[in-house]
Amino acid sequence: MPVTVRPATPADHQAWLPLWRGYQEFYAVSLPEDTTASTWARFHDPASPLHCALAVGADDLPVGLVHLILHGSTWSAAPHCYLSDLFVPPELRGKGVGRALIAYAYDWARGRACSCVHWLTHQDNGAARALYDQVAVHRGHIRYEKILAD
């Protein structure tokens, strides 16, 4: 499926929202509306390290999203890029959209002199892992987290 990946604009909000909700549904979470609104606003704040890009078809309608976070690292003098979220609707998976979004992430990170792009996925996400194993290296790390009270 031929797609173009481009930065999201404020005008893309209504097209981005179903993709963002689809991502949450896939991971069986439901974020508060104020978190979604804050996230969208930070994508368009030049002072924020968050970035959103959309894969679009020939009709310029979004068919996938990627969210990136630029951050410092103790392992490199150069910044790193965390690929926070990547989502392609189930009916479009396996058609090259995810691969195009990851290629965009690599190019975006190179443009900011990053030394690394990294991300997480669930161990049971076999379809995504099949792609990720082709485009990156799994180094065996296990994620731990502690949710802090608000």
Image (cartoon, grey):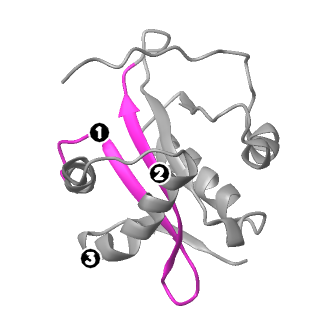
Contact between labelled residues 3 and 1, with CB atoms less than 8 Å apart: no
Q: Amino acid at mark 2?
A: Gln
* 142 part of magenta stretch: no
Task: Please determine whether, in this image, residue 4 is positioned above or below residue 138.
Answer: below
Q: Secondary structure at mark 3?
A: helix
> Which residue is outermost to the top?
74
Q: Amino acid at mark 1?
A: Pro
Task: Please determine whether, in this image, residue 145 is positioned above or below residue 117.
Answer: above
Q: How far apart are labels 3 and 2 at the CA level?
A: 21 Å
Q: How far apart are labels 1 and 2 at the CA level?
A: 21 Å
- Residue count near mark 2 (Cα–Cα under 10 Å), binned few <14, some 14–19, many ≥20: some
* 63 part of magenta stretch: yes
Is the C terminus in the top left, top right, bottom left or bottom right quadrant?
top left
Q: Residue at x 75, y 28 (%)?
A: 137
Q: Determine which quarter of the picture holds residue 64.
A: bottom right
Q: Using residue 132 as the reference point, say whether residue 120 is left or right of it.
A: left
Q: Residues in magenta?
A: 45-72
Q: Secondary structure at mark 1?
A: loop
Q: Residue at x 56, y 56 (%)?
A: 87
